Image (tube, rainbow, N blue to C red):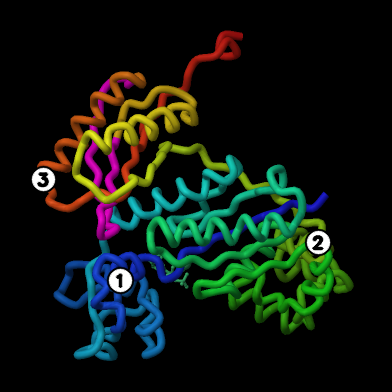
Amino acid sequence: MPQFIIFIDFDYFFAQVEEILNPEIREKPVVVCVYSGRTETSGAVATSNYLARKIGIKSGMPLPQAMKIGKDRAVFLPIRKDLYKEWSDHIMDIISEYSDKIEIASIDEAYIDVTDSCKDFNDAVNTAQKIKDEIYNKTGVRVSVGVSVNKAIAKVLGDMAKPNGIKSVGPSEIQDFLKGLEISKIPGVGKVIGQRLNDAGIKYITDVINADRDQLINIIGTAKYNYLYDIANNTYNKPVTPREKKNFGRYMTLPENTRDVNIIIPYVKKAIDSAYEKAPGLPSELSLVAIMEDISILSRSYTGARIDKNRALEIAIGLLNRIINEDQRNIRRVGVRLGKITKNETLDDFF
Ligand code: TTP
Ligand code: CA
């Protein structure tokens, strides 16, 4: 039985969030910078939008060099990690509605396994498109998506789909696809290993099947050999492994953009009910998250002892009132996030 795996990677993520919050910069090269603080221009580029990449400004580049290329035409912004994390959490929450088997691989990458909920591969591709559309409609973030029969090929396809694309290779096409797939495209095969394999006559992933096993193990070690061999042979099936989820968020779209708490509160309640249903225990931290009419995200948090559902509503309403008092904008979506969850004790814990 093949797995149906969807891989999602957010496009030029940090810079894209900055563009969404400030659409005027979208027509320019945008560079998100990590300033080291030693001198005014010391530091490096975290990421850049595609216009900046076009003129040669890329992740990891020293800032003085980037500024030389981009002066007068690029927008340089300081990194806002907490903000991107907030957006990432929101998007990951949207994705996790589609499967409990979600592996959050980094701030902007996730795998989900939809084998159980999809009747065939076509259904998995449709689900992937739905997730992509929902992320865009709810946050404005564009993502690239790969759908296939294992994690490695889903990621290969996600990379090929950049930017803003979706690519799939199902069970009936996988053999042909592997035949034309260069080994350098496989996740985990960097420049150095790719070159060494090329030197040993391995250009395509399927070349691994007939290569001299001992010779290859000498070059890349047993673990990597087995990994590549399994991919080539289409027997790679490493499971999507959910990391322990640290928080559970649920969001509701309001019927209209509003600041009227009487309209908003029933939706807060729905979000709380739904989040508590998912969470494996009681939280000690509760955040109220408001997605404003211009799509920016505001949140306010409360920390206390194990918070039950009834108290959660009271606390959330207090936090909502704080946001309404401190900000003039209308709210478009509202949600809650439960953090620092203590697992419920079950009988199993006593034996
Ligand atoms: P990536 O997914 O590698 O890059 P990206 O999202 O900016 O662009 P792409 O469209 O090609 O996917 O990295 C995700 C985020 O990680 C990126 O937005 C910023 C951060 N990052 C750094 O801070 N330093 C780095 O050197 C790299 C590569 C990424
Ligand atoms: Ca990315």
Give the alpha-carbon distance from disc 1 to disc 3, as whole Å. 24 Å
Q: Residues within 10 Å of mark 1 (few under 14, many from 20)?
A: some
Q: Secondary structure at mark 1?
A: helix
* Mark 2 or mark 3, whichever is nearer to me: 3
Residue 145, picture quadrant: bottom right
Residue topped by disc 1:
19
Q: Is residue 260 left or right of residue 306?
A: left
Which residue: 33% across, 70% down? Answer: 15
The amino acid at mark 3 is Glu
Q: Which of the two discs, 1 and 3, labels the residue nearer the N terminus?
A: 1
Which residue: 55% across, 72% down? Answer: 165
Which residue: 81% across, 76% down? Answer: 179
The C terminus lies in quadrant: top right
The amino acid at mark 1 is Glu
Vertical order, 297 against 178 (above or below): above
Magenta stretch: dominant secondary structure: strand
Vertical order, 75 against 126 (above or below): below
Which residue: 17% across, 53% down? Answer: 329
Give the alpha-carbon distance from disc 2 to disc 3, as whole Å. 53 Å
Q: Residues within 10 Å of mark 3 (few under 14, many from 20)?
A: few
Q: Residues within 10 Å of mark 2 (few under 14, many from 20)?
A: some
The amino acid at mark 2 is Pro
Q: Can you give x and y, in whole percent of width and height, for residue 254 in the image?
A: 33, 45
Q: Is residue 296 magenta?
A: yes
Give the alpha-carbon distance from disc 2 to disc 1, as whole Å. 38 Å
Q: Can you give x and y, in whole percent of width and height, for residue 148 in the image?
A: 70, 61
Q: Which residues are magenta?
A: 287-307
Residue topped by disc 2:
171
Disc marking residue 149 = none
Residue topped by disc 3:
326
